[in-house]
Amino acid sequence: MNVKIVGKWEHGWDTPLTEYNRWIHPIREFGIQEFYMTPISGILKQSVKEFRTLDEILNLEENEGYTKVFCDDKADTSLIDFEHPTKAMYVFGRTSSDALPLKTDDDLSVSIPTPRNTGGFWAHQACSIILYDRYLKGEE
């Protein structure tokens, strides 16, 4: 699969060790092998690569050629109309710190419309919805 997931640990609302389980199960279910998080927590799980900053992850040589898709309730495009790139790196913020300010003109952004549109999803929940949408639209 040509998909990578990038996120920020929810320091303050959760702990990386418990949050890890909320991320990893849907990620595995959709067959994704590349999972990056920031900052370094020290939980020592082989299936997640941790880095000091989001910038470090986004600028890794191994991530060249992937379209960065910033997932945020203030994004440009609704998930309903969104066309998933073949090689996508989905980037998620956290409750107290979104990732959208790092978006460049070459990147995409997507939001999940809801009846209330209050941005009430945790990042791992939004990730699951976006991956399921990708699956439904035939991108694997």
Image: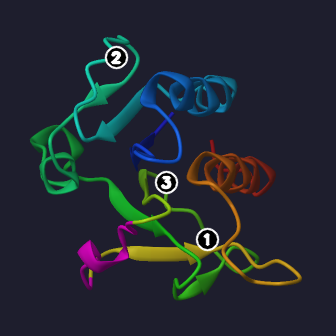
Please provide percent x and percent y for residue 114.
82, 77
Residue pointed to by mark 3: 86
How did the renderer colour the structure? Answer: rainbow
Q: Which residue is mark 2?
A: 43
From which residue to which does the magenta span run?
Answer: 97-105
Q: Report the amino acid beneath label 1.
A: Glu
State the separation of the CA atoms marked 3 and 2: 31 Å
User: Which residue in the structure is indicated by mark 1?
Assistant: 83
Give the Cα distance between marks 1 and 3: 9 Å
Q: Residue at x 63, y 31 (%)?
A: 22
Contact (Cβ within 8 Å) of mark 1 with mark 3: no
Identity, as a three-letter code, of the amino acid under mark 2: Ile
Q: Is residue 138 above or below residue 25?
A: below
Assess whether mark 1 and mark 2 are in contact (beta carbons under 8 angstroms). no
Describe the element under mark 1 as helix, strand or loop: loop
Q: Residue 8 versus residue 30: which sits nearer the camera? A: 8
- Label 2: state its secondary structure: loop
Tag on residue 106?
none
Three-letter code, disc 3: Thr
Image x and y of residue 140, in percent? 62, 41
